[in-house]
Image (cartoon, grey):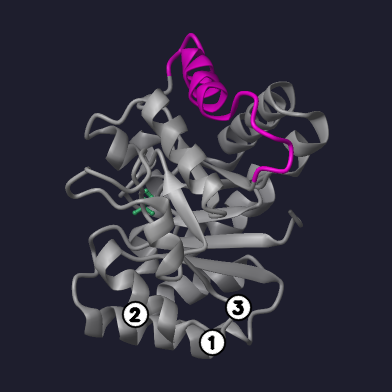
Amino acid sequence: MARKRLVVGNWKSYIESPSEAHALALALRRKARALPGVEVWLAPPYPLLPAVAEVLESSPIKVGAQALSASPGGKHTGEVSANMLKQVGAQFALVGHSERRAQGEGDEQVRAQLLQALQAKLTAVLCVGEHERLQDGSHFSFIERQLVVALDALPPKAKVIVAYEPVWAIGKSAEEAMQPQDLEQMAIFIRKTLVETLDRSAGLKIPILYGGSVESANTHALLIGGGVNGFLVGHASVEAEPFLEIIKACK
Ligand code: 13P
């Protein structure tokens, strides 16, 4: 996977109506061509995904899901399988987002979801993140475990992206986000873990994103000082202008 900068918008449940989703996708499609050098992906809520995929069909912006089932299709009421997502236009899926883990999804389930995504040829965006930073540094081993359980023994060509999202930094403002020097330290640790867990060249190629209160005010500093390949953006991705500002700052 080439190291182009990547900005993924996770719409969470902020956008609830098809008309709002349509308008936002259209506004981004119009501007996307003027922003070469940065890849833009969007993760709308499930019911809005097919319509957003249709709006973006001939644009470089990719569409994916915020979650997916750990099982293939079958007797699983309320579940959304990887194959379903693929057929309605998804090209990637987030797996292991902390807001899903908070609902009880454990590391093994996250691995099963990741394998489902890969078998359907969806890029898996694996989210990891500690709840708090501890004096004794044990948040590093927490992240290591999340990575190793999900990625151990994957084929070297598996299409995976890692999104590091410390839970304590999510849903706040740029001032309360992680500091670039702390992010850089964690990005180096994640890279080392990837190289040790996977084949060396695969571990070096996997893009590492940061998520947690990314806004236009901190994008540049986190990109330059944090040593990451892009961002997973929540609240600042659900209106065109703030999201475009973040994308521009990644050029
Ligand atoms: P915020 O950008 O709202 O902090 O959300 C981050 C996130 O969880 C993206 O997946």
Q: Neighbour class for label 3 at 10 Å: few (<14), some, many (≥20)?
A: some
Q: Is residue 111 above or below residue 149?
A: below
| Residue labelled with disc 2 | 51
The answer to which of marks 3 and 1 sits earlier in the sequence is 1
What's the amino acid at mark 3? Pro
What's the amino acid at mark 1? Lys
Q: Residue at x 38, y 44 (%)?
A: 72
Q: Secondary structure at mark 1?
A: helix
| Residue labelled with disc 1 | 31
The answer to which of marks 3 and 2 sits earlier in the sequence is 2
Q: Is residue 168 above or below residue 143?
A: below
What's the amino acid at mark 2? Ala
User: Does label 1 point to a residue whose CB lies under 8 Å from ligand 1?
Assistant: no
| Residue labelled with disc 3 | 60
Residue 238 sits in quarter? bottom left
User: Does label 3 point to a residue whose CB lies under 8 Å from ligand 1?
Assistant: no
Q: Residue at x 77, y 29 (%)?
A: 199
The residue sitting at the front extreme is: 74
Residue 64 seen by the camera: no
Measured as percent of width and height from the top left, residue 19 is found at 23, 85
- Between 89 and 213, the one nearer to me in the picture: 89
Q: Quarter of the image containing the C terminus?
A: bottom right
Magenta-tinted stretch: 134-158
State which mark lies toward you, 3 or 1.
Answer: 3
Give the alpha-carbon distance from disc 3 to disc 1, as whole Å.
11 Å
Give the alpha-carbon distance from disc 1 to disc 2, as whole Å.
19 Å
Question: In the drawing, does residue 111 fall left or right of residue 203?
Answer: left
Question: In the drawing, does residue 220 fall left or right of residue 83?
Answer: right
